[in-house]
Image (cartoon, helix red, strand yellow):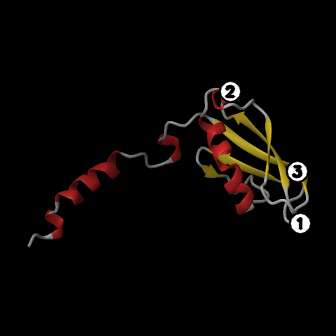
Amino acid sequence: MTDSSEHSGSESSSSRSSSSPTSLEDRDVPDYLVIATAKDSRCPFVQVGDRIVINGTMVDLEKTTSLCSVALSAIQYSLFMMGKANDPRDFGRSDVYELQCPDPQDRVIFEIRRESLDS
């Protein structure tokens, strides 16, 4: 039987974590805020003008005014892609486009756009 501290997996695990980014600033992510703004809403919880703001891979809770898990799950790939893409057309999108929450009764239409953090 071996001592768990001698296990080779623990050594490689610690060396892996020391080389990984420790903050969003250390990651290779383009400098964009991605903003989903409610343009039309039938939802009692999301008002026209409410925003979901993504900074890197994180929801910016200070700038986000309403966060619905159904809407976020439906549009999250597009939000992520807009933050990473050098050119949204590479993913079949323009710089500004609309997406709809999938809830047919309480649907929300979001305008998706991004703003450079360099400006």
Q: Amino acid at mark 2?
A: Arg
Quick one: label 1 or label 2, which is nearer the N terminus? 1
**Which quadrant of the structure image shows residue 82?**
top right
Q: Which mark is residue 44?
A: 1
Extreme residue in the bottom direction: 1
Quick one: label 1 or label 3, which is nearer the N terminus? 1
Task: Please tell me which residue lies in front, 31 or 48.
Answer: 48
In the rendered structure, are the residues bearing label 1 and label 3 in contact, judged by CB atoms less than 8 Å apart? no
Quick one: label 2 or label 3, which is nearer the N terminus? 3
- Kindly report which numbered mark, 1 or 3, lies closer to the viewer in this rendering: 1
Q: Which mark is residue 89?
A: 2
Task: Name the residue that disc number 3 marks.
Answer: 49
Q: Give x and y (percent) for residue 40.
A: 91, 50
Q: Quadrant of the C terminus?
A: top right
Q: Which residue does the image show at 70% across and 53% down from the upper left?
A: 74
Q: Which residue does the image show at 67% across and 56% down from the upper left?
A: 73
Q: Amino acid at mark 3?
A: Gly
Kind of element beneath mark 3? loop
